[in-house]
């Protein structure tokens, strides 16, 4: 124990400036991430603002039971799971494919132009994006609605139809985040050994074969890491997006845990109940991360 402590002190003295650089990041996480975690105790109390967190009485799992037995539980869980699942299954591969295709471009000017255009939506608020989608899908003046009507002859209101609303959420989310999500994969592709492609050219491999046999295996570790992080947010179905784009006609297929927590917690002042619902979502995310990480390790060991 003494030797380990002495070794640690020696490393700190040697790399003192590096440790000093770490301090701001540590303080940020401690102050804004870990200290507020004390607030989860509200989920186990009958919290009253007038009495404060400490003086509010403990009620155990009362609010969790109330959430699970609520008639809204099945609806918000199904909506959240389906929307998140669609975004994961359809949206997760898109940035990978986009990064691989972008990496194949030889014109640097065209490549940078496409990158810039694809990145831009990420920096625009969902308030703007949501209203843009509303205008584009408007049955009277929307460009996309007009195109659909001209091709099919059917006048659709995609934002008012429960059968199409989830698809609108998924497609608009992919459009907004595709370019930004591809940055990690583009960085990984930059580290692929070019001699592998040269050897494949000598063997007469086609471009598709090189993408499948060299490019994808070379970035598989990055893909797995990003998948683990994405699965950890499996119940994050897009609070701002749904809140802005949803309407009473599609509420049965659009209400997710986050919007439910907002309405119950902020608008109805049910702080303990909403905290319990949100804590349940976080626990599910943690379990999913551990499961996917375990599966990924076993899969990597079998390779």
Image (spheres, helix red, strand yellow):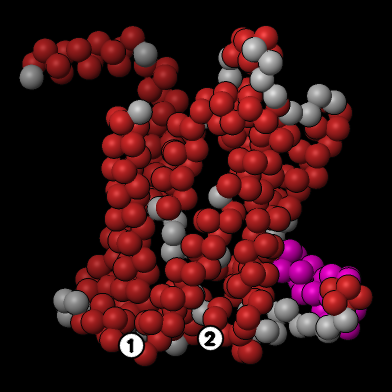
Picture layout, residue 207 above or below residue 296: above
- Where in the figure is residue 8, as x and y percent of width and height? 22, 17
Q: Residues within 10 Å of mark 2 (few under 14, many from 20)?
A: some
- Reply yes or no: does residue 42 show up in magenta: no
Q: Which residues are magenta?
A: 128-147
User: Which residue was labeled with disc 1?
Assistant: 70
Picture layout, residue 294 above or below residue 134: above
Please tell me which residue is depicted at 56% across the width and 78% down the height of the picture. Answer: 254
Query: How far is disc 2 from disc 1 in space, using C-alphas?
Result: 15 Å
- Where in the figure is residue 177, as x and y percent of width and height? 65, 51
Q: Locate residue 61 relative to residue 149 in the image: left or right.
A: left
User: Which residue was labeled with disc 2?
Assistant: 252
Q: Front-most of 71 and 40?
A: 71
Q: Which mark is residue 231?
A: none
- The answer to whether any part of residue 232 appears in the image is yes
2 and 1 marks in contact (CB < 8 Å) = no
Q: Front-most of 293 and 209?
A: 209
Element under label 1?
loop
* Quarter assignment of residue 168: bottom right
Q: Choose the circle earlier in sequence order: 2 or 1.
A: 1
């Amino acid at each position: 124990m003494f030797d380990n402590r002495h070794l640690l002190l020696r490393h700190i003295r040697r790399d003192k400036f590096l440790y000093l650089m770490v301090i701001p990041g540590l303080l940020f996480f401690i102050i804004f991430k870990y200290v507020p975690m004390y607030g989860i105790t509200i989920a186990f109390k009958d919290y009253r603002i007038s009495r404060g967190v400490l003086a509010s009485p403990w009620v155990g799992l009362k609010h969790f039971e109330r959430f699970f037995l609520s008639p809204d539980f099945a609806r918000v869980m199904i909506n959240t799971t389906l929307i998140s699942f669609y975004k994961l299954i359809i949206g997760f591969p898109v940035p990978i494919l986009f990064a691989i295709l972008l990496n194949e471009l030889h014109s640097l000017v065209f490549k940078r132009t496409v990158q810039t255009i694809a990145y831009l939506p990420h920096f625009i608020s969902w308030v703007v994006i949501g209203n843009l989608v509303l205008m584009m899908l408007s049955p009277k003046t929307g460009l996309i609605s007009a195109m659909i009507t001209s091709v099919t002859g059917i006048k659709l209101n995609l934002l008012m139809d429960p059968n199409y609303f989830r698809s609108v959420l998924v497609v608009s989310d992919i459009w907004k985040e595709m370019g930004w999500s591809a940055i990690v994969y583009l960085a990984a592709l930059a580290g692929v050994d070019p001699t592998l492609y040269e050897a494949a050219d000598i063997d007469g491999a086609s471009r598709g074969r090189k993408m499948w046999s060299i490019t994808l295996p070379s970035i598989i570790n990055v893909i797995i890491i990003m998948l683990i992080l994405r699965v950890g947010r499996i119940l994050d179905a897009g609070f701002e997006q749904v809140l802005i784009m949803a309407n009473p006609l599609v509420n049965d297929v659009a209400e997710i845990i986050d919007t439910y927590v907002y309405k119950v917690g902020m608008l109805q002042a049910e702080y303990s109940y909403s905290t319990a619902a949100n804590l349940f979502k976080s626990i599910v995310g943690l379990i999913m991360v551990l499961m996917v990480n375990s599966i990924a390790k076993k899969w990597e060991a079998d390779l």
